Amino acid sequence: MASPQTGSLVLTGTVQADARAPGGHELHVNQLEVFHLVQEEFPIQSKEHGTGFLMEHRHLWIRSPRQQAILRIRHEIIRACRTFFDDRGFLLVDTPIFTPNACEGTTTLFETDYFGEKAYLTQSGQLYNEATAAAFGKVYCFGPTFRAEKSKTRRHLMEFWMVEPEVAFAELADVMTLAEEFLTSIVAHVLKRRREELKVLDRDMKKLEAIVPPFPRITYAEAVERLQKKGNPIQPGDDFGGDEETILSNEFDRPAIIHRYPTALKAFYMQNDPENPDLALCMDVLAPEGYGEIIGGGQRIHERDKLLTRLKAHRLPEDAFRWYLDLRTFGSVPHAGFGMGIERAVAWICGLEHVRETIPFPRMLYKIYP
Amino acid sequence: MASPQTGSLVLTGTVQADARAPGGHELHVNQLEVFHLVQEEFPIQSKEHGTGFLMEHRHLWIRSPRQQAILRIRHEIIRACRTFFDDRGFLLVDTPIFTPNACEGTTTLFETDYFGEKAYLTQSGQLYNEATAAAFGKVYCFGPTFRAEKSKTRRHLMEFWMVEPEVAFAELADVMTLAEEFLTSIVAHVLKRRREELKVLDRDMKKLEAIVPPFPRITYAEAVERLQKKGNPIQPGDDFGGDEETILSNEFDRPAIIHRYPTALKAFYMQNDPENPDLALCMDVLAPEGYGEIIGGGQRIHERDKLLTRLKAHRLPEDAFRWYLDLRTFGSVPHAGFGMGIERAVAWICGLEHVRETIPFPRMLYKIYP
């Protein structure tokens, strides 16, 4: 028999406090029962492995201390999100995964055959959140979302989890404050409960302790100026890409709220600024330390006529949005919300280079095993 | 202007306790601001509407008191599930929605193109849960699952949420007890926090107060005998359908745990009973009052050779299960778990006739709007 590298066994004995022990306790063993003596060498050794190899062995890689620390922090972040909204009287209202119409083009949507009809996997619960916020006032949804983008960056996964609150009677300023309180609460929660795991990751906790209000709030126009001063070639009206986000997100020691992007860059449902209709009442929140966008949101159009005009301008099918227009026909109110991508938040809080380690079984470009 | 049926407005005033008021309080209004006076008749009137009509107007139907009560109880049930596992040291480990291989035939799977490969939407997180339980000991996953069954019964949805715990070193008896404690805890939680909503639904609370341990535990063989005594034509070896579940579930005043079904009726990974290898160490939990199966689970095969034999007998591709076999190669231990369908649990606890009202936007056969 080869000498076993690993195994599974049951130890019975007495646990005693011992300051010299790494965990503070020693187990004095009386009995040992072997369940399984391993005959083969464990594929993951202490030597360096390439990411490709580790991803092929993700089911075993999650047994290592670093991956365990990340997944424990992930759970804590998810719990902190839910607790934040539950404690504030938000109702969890799950939005559907299968959606009937492709709101904004099908190029980044996963499609399936739904008994002869085409259905698409959701990219966001927002439109449905607007219906439930109109019914319940304050709601959130929390589930997997899907983007079929051919992106291979450190910030992209094909399947990722999003938490999205939506609030009736709220305006842009309200959700900026909500996002600020939300992120502050999550970081505080992790610092309180997962200090050991942050140590395993060598996370600089001072940087997390700095995450307190007020967060800087800068307009899109100010952000463009800041980028240009750093030598970035961006022009007013251009959207931010990964590079721009990284630069901006390195400027501050806490999340930065960038608001009032040009309407032309944003989705059809975005409310515009009464003081300058070319600007949308929207925001992105960029995590510090170069992590970039983790939250996107804003105020939605609540006037039926304005929405109808916008649908036409975007050449969207009115019939598919019949129910969405109904929300503006029967007791419409201003409302706003946002979405946070869990994996990006985990990457930032854990201080990781890539989102692929933030989810148990990452789904990436051409990568779906195990 | 037509006389408005509904609208949205902001009332400002003083709230005063008043025993004569339905909610126990009166609002003395000082100011009234109208946001939106509705010009059209609200589609849902107090008269009876057909389910088809209501489902087409689901985005407005959720504004009615009964639907609101159901969705509030749904949130409470979900919260109770998470609290139960979190408090017991289970780690939430999200399992993937996209899965690469069709474990047990593709007839009930939704398929999508994953960058040139076929991917399927998950029917259960169990196999992945086994990997994470081997890493963390006690885990649960909680997310949407999908079945493309052409079923149009009161118990089926195409898209539904499942919570699935998995425990290393656990055997069938352990997860029977876990399921019993779990259901007891959920019902107690709802009774404590959502009494008002249960009243709106005219739910008989006595029936819920009876949900306390011990739950009856009967073998498959005993269940068949009971069915035959009721005149049901079932023969030993037959699976239970909706009718059989309804009969059995009406026999008891609390959930009944049916265990040890014939191995031939169950999935390839089910451990068999050492005392009778033709029986699987599995269980279904049937909710009372005719609601039928809400939980299914059991003990999994942890021996590599046995699993390999079973894969071959089921003509399953060994290569696709390479990672799953690895779990039996490197430190395998007995383990067990179960899954509970949220919508069926909500239907039972709320006392509803059909699962379609238990989820904000139900996805049913040929039914994907709104």
Image: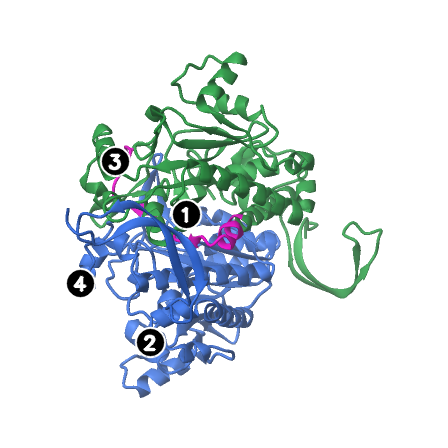
Chain colours: A blue, B green
Give the percent coordinates (x, y) of residue A253: 41, 81
Check if mark 4's residue and mark 3's residue have beta carbons within 8 Å.
Answer: no
Element at label 4: loop
Q: Is residue B31 visible?
A: no
Q: Chain of mark 1?
A: A
Q: Of discs 4 and 2, which sits in the foreground?
A: 4
Above-or-below relation of B130 to B259: below
Mark 1 and mark 2, same subunit?
yes
Question: Which one is nearer the viewer's eye here, A6 or A310?
Answer: A6
Q: Of discs 1 and 3, which sits in the foreground?
A: 3
- Residue underneath mark 4: A50
Above-or-below relation of A58 to A344: above
Question: Which one is nearer the viewer's eye here, A190 or A86?
Answer: A190
Q: Which residues are magenta?
A: B81-106
Element at label 3: helix
Q: Of discs 1 and 2, which sits in the foreground?
A: 2
Disc 1/disc 3 C-alpha distance (Å): 34 Å
